[in-house]
Image (cartoon, rainbow, N blue to C red):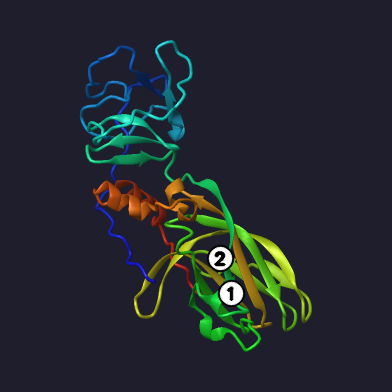
Amino acid sequence: MSSTEPDRPASRRTLLRRAAVTGGAAVAATAVTATPASAAPGDPVVIGLPNSGGPTTVTSAAPAGGATLALRNATGATLHIEKGPSYTSPAPTGALYAEGTALAVSNGNGAYSAFSTANATMLVPVPPTRILDTRSAAGRARLIEGAGRIDAQGRAVADSFLVVHLQGIAEYADGMLGNITVANTEKAGFVTVYGRGDRPNASTINWWSAGQLLSNGVITQLGAYETANGDYYPDVVGIYVPKASATALILDVTGLLVFHPDSAVINSPKTAGARVAADGNRGVRAQAIKEAAERGDRAVHTGA
């Protein structure tokens, strides 16, 4: 299956209200009475309560961009982020609260997830999953490029470029961890596994003679790929087999680097896309994930 490239808004929605700055660190106050007033513009962010003025960027006067958001309660002790109140209807507009592994601020219909930095990712282990085995037709089901480069022995022939789609495993993930295996090698050679940009001048696994069976760990970015007929696929990994040797290829994934746990869809029966439909607001969270993932050049190129 193919998917279409997501629309990108003209500007990224920011996630948190402006907080007061003290000594280079923003200070967020917690509710200390049963019915405190909403925070006024410029006041410290109030956890779990509406904040007027809409979401804006948290800023700091720290030098060299070393901004810090310091969360503390009225006694100065560390604020422990815990699951916020459960709302039977959408949280009040501007309410800041803990949601899963992230802070979120409500827009009145849903919540924008707040990431810790512009490019922060987390490692999410997934069940070991085989995404490619060139030795069988079933093992090649995820190939969106390169299926015609497999010989009668199940080997990717020399000078082949394969693209594997992680549909049902990842949704706008940033990278993957796994294992690459070569089998029934023709002669000495190597393979390069990579996730975006031009093909790197480096090897992921090497072998030295015919008939070898070898494995090596893989940590690589994930990228996106558009086929000649215009089908667009996010969450792909490319594999290059150079001119030196043909080999069978087996690739397993054991972990994902993601901007939000929802991107590891293999771990949850409710994907980010499904959560979009359930929330009925075209997926604020999913859109934020897509925007983060699509920054820069994610395309996988065959190289020179």
Q: Is residue 272 left or right of residue 248?
A: left
In this figure, which residue is indicated by the disc labeled 1? Answer: 240
Q: Note whether 145 is above or below 255 in the view shown.
A: below
Residue shown at 44% from the left, 27% from the top? 81
Element type where label 1 sits in the image: strand
> Furthest-right residue in view?
209
Q: Which label's residue is closer to the chain start, 1 or 2? A: 2
Residue 303 visible in image: no
Could you say which is closer to the camera, residue 99 or residue 14? Answer: 99
Could you say which is closer to the camera, residue 7 or residue 251? Answer: 251
> Furthest-bottom residue in view?
152
Task: Please state which amino acid type lies under the numbered disc 2.
Answer: Tyr
Position of residue 69 measured from the top left corner of the image (x, y, whole percent) = 42, 28
Count of residue discs = 2
The label shown at residue 277 is none
Q: How far apart are labels 1 and 2 at the CA level? A: 8 Å
- CB atoms of marks 1 and 2 within 8 Å: yes
Task: Please state which amino acid type lies under the numbered disc 1.
Answer: Tyr
In this figure, which residue is indicated by the disc labeled 2? Answer: 194
Element type where label 2 sits in the image: strand
Residue 108 visible in image: yes
Q: Is residue 25 left or right of residue 11?
A: right
Position of residue 120 measured from the top left corner of the image (x, y, whole percent) = 47, 44
Residue shown at 45% from the left, 54% from the top? 265
Q: Note whether 23 is above or below 195 in the view shown.
A: above
